[in-house]
Amino acid sequence: MSLIPTLTAFLSGLIFSLGLILSGMIDPARVLAFLDVTGAWNPALALVMASAVATAVPAYAWMRRKHRTVLGTQSHVPRRRAVDLQLVLGAAIFGLGWGLAGLCPGPGLILAGSGNTGALVFVTAMGAAMYFAANVDALLSRRRKGNADA
Amino acid sequence: MAFMDLWPYVAGGVLIGIAASLLVLVNGRVAGISGIFNQVIELAPGQQYWRLFFLLGFLLPAPFLALNKVNFEVGSVGTMLTAGLLVGLGTYVGGGCTSGHGVCGNANFSRRSQVATLTFMATAMVTVFIVRHAV
């Protein structure tokens, strides 16, 4: 555990969280109003993602060129580009849950941390589903490996 | 809407972009909340500490919301339970959420993230339409 990356990870988490709070992304009613395109649509939240993406473009462009961090360590940015069914299916399921509650993982965690009971239920269920999916995933890849060995 | 009404959206987004830039430039990591949370709760052996510290920083402002009595209306327990299960499963299978695909992946011009973002935006909008206007 080296000092600088540990410190920047902490700072990154803190700044990210403050951004979500300031932008109103942690208010499920506002998120649902953004998603409600045929109702009283409030498109302002699109500005959040647009300005976040625009701000992060130069850093990612640098990483694509250098493949190394400013500390000279390895980049772990995924390089895979192929679109598959798993990606689309997973994103579709995520969107279904996001549309139901108006909460995605980040805002869910912040609200749960502030003691919101509903958000605590959301985060617990989210963690349980991830844990379950990861175990099924591990089981399947072990079986696939076993078949390949036989 | 006047600029004064819109500046928190832009400033919030810029903060999120700065956080994502910092993590990728120094740690070489994608600031994807679902992935970070998933890896931390898996308690994988050889767990990398950066995720734990990211989450610590991420959760630091939360108690101050409670202290200032900032709270938001959420859905029923049943809705939150169902939504949580779907979000957990979907982000695991699809490899990311609004932060990993929506912010970082799109800033990296990743085809996968473009497709994922369009897909979850579309199903979320359809879900809201069905819940609010069709039922």
Image (spheres, rainbow, N blue to C red):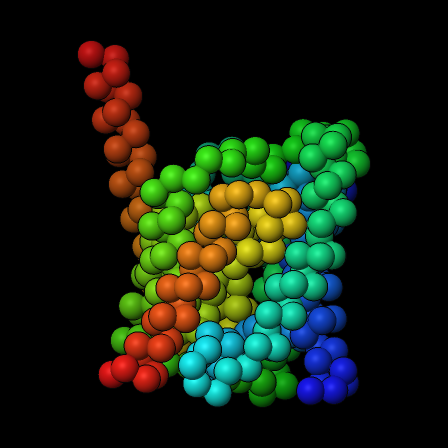
Count the marks: how many?
A: 0
Q: Is residue A136 left or right of residue B71?
A: left
Seen at 66% across and 33% down, the residue is: A75
Seen at 35% across and 43% down, the residue is: A86
Seen at 57% across and 43% down, the residue is: B110
Quick check: A20 above or below A133? below
Residue B100 lies, in percent from the top left, at 55, 51
Q: Is residue A14 visible?
A: no
Image quadrant in which the N terminus of chain A is located: top right
Image quadrant in which the C terminus of chain A is located: top left
Residue A136 lies, in percent from the top left, at 27, 41
Q: Is residue B106 visible?
A: yes
Quick check: B11 above or below B46? below
Residue A91 lies, in percent from the top left, at 40, 54
Which residue, as the protein is rendered here, is positioned at the far front? A38
Question: Which quadrant holds residue B109?
Answer: top right
Seen at 60% across and 37% down, the residue is: A77
Which residue, as the protein is rendered here, is positioned at the far right? A70
Q: Is residue A144 left or right of residue B4?
A: left
**Foreground pick, A50 / A133:** A50
**Foreground pick, A36 / B47:** A36
Residue A87 lies, in percent from the top left, at 40, 45
**Foreground pick, A85 / A78:** A85
